[in-house]
Amino acid sequence: MSGRHAGPVTSSRTSTPLRYGWTTGACATAATTAAYTALLTGSFPDPVEIVLPKGQRPAFALAREALKDRVGLDDREALDDRVGLDNRVGLDNRVGLDDRVAFAGVVKDAGDDPDVTHGALVGATVRPAPAGAGVVFRAGPGVGTVTKPGLPLPVGEPAINPVPREMIRGAVAEVAGRYGGTGDVFVEISVERGEELARRTWNPRLGILGGLSILGTTGIVVPYSCSAWIDSIRRGIDVARAAGHRHVAACTGSTSERVATELYGLPDDALLDMGDFAGAVLKYLRRHPVPRLTVAGGIGKLAKLANGHLDLHSGRSQVDFQALGELVAGAGGDAALVAGVRGANTALDALRQCQAAGLPLGDLVAAGARNTALEVLRGSEVTVDVVVIDRAGTIVGRTT
């Protein structure tokens, strides 16, 4: 596991201090630093210290290390058994340099954040590159390759994001300066079980195939900040725009995504997994518009959006039954129905009461959600429609 942590953050729900963690980009930088140091000196620093973009200097313990040079394999580990170190990932004679190669691996510690990569081994394989090459990045096992335009990397590049690349380049330059290296190296980043883990992320939809992305803008994971999810929303919009899509659907979950697909026949890369982050979708679309947006979700979450909430998580916003009662009253509901809605246990309970009375609460919620969305999108050329569903996926309200 990594060594020193950036510090605790307090959970608003439990008042319990939560540990910060490290991004895959920070782990990849630490692994690269250790591997390149070993390549130049024959010895792995452990723990290995790196510099983060804001100047922090955390230290990481090495979980695996291996070194191969002209006189043979280091006795400490069998290099060919390490992640990413075999001919499948380019460590053959085609490079035409020498046989020196070093590998270091760091176990990703996401702190108390529910990160799919927590506990994964992030590795770096480093070997000499031709003079003047600088740092040449490669995707090892478990790291994806960009296959669609719209991402901050060209098609065909390893999915190692710009900030981690800069961190790795800086680390290579520092090590080269300290130990007399040229700084010309191939750096291959790998993530153990990365291809399997990537299926639980947006990567396949974004056109990142074969594994995970190496992420991070600060190097630090703040628990429950959901920064990776929000970043994926933004990249999803970028990919949709680059593909020329004029209609995207932001959906709160898989059921609403299925409904939106059936309604509009949208391709996979026009679907945005919004989850609870309505604000992230709307604010990014305001700056990077797509002509048409459909917002699709369950009545509970969209009732919150109708009431002006942009974070729809149950721990950070609640359905306002008094506000729902006002909607019902404004639509002509009688006193008994208004009282029933105000005293409802759930938004679905309120919906059922209104359906029995013949009052279209779903349409009222859809209209309110659309008004909130348009307010956030003000000044942008985006038209909005809203689809409200129940738990079974039945459409219970829409705007036109």
Image (cartoon, grey):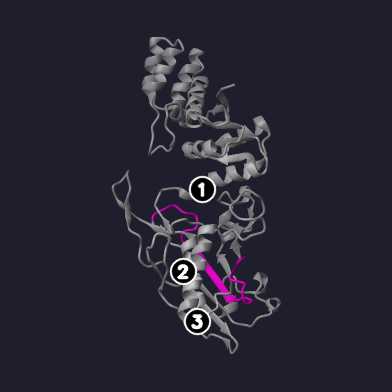
Q: Which mark is residue 354?
A: none
Quarter of the picture containing the C terminus is: top right
The location of residue 308, given as percent across then percent down, is: 42, 29
Report the residue marked by disc 3.
180
Q: Tell me the quadrant of the picture where the N terminus can be found.
A: bottom left
Residue at the limit of the structure toward the bottom, as seen here? 71
Extreme residue toward the front, this view = 132
Q: Amino acid at mark 2?
A: Ala
At mark 1, the secondary structure is helix
The residue at the point 32 percent across, 55 percent down is 8
Residue marked by disc 2? 30
Question: What segment is highlighted magenta in the picture?
Answer: 112-138
Left or right: where 137 falls relative to 276: right
Residue at the disc numbered 1: 231
Give the label, 1 or 3, closer to the camera: 3
Q: Amino acid at mark 3?
A: Gly
Q: Earlier in the sequence, mark 2 or mark 1?
A: 2
Give the percent coordinates (x, y) of residue 198: 57, 55
Percent position of residue 258, x then y:
61, 36
Query: In the rendered image of this protein, does residue 339 appear above or below residue 14?
Result: above
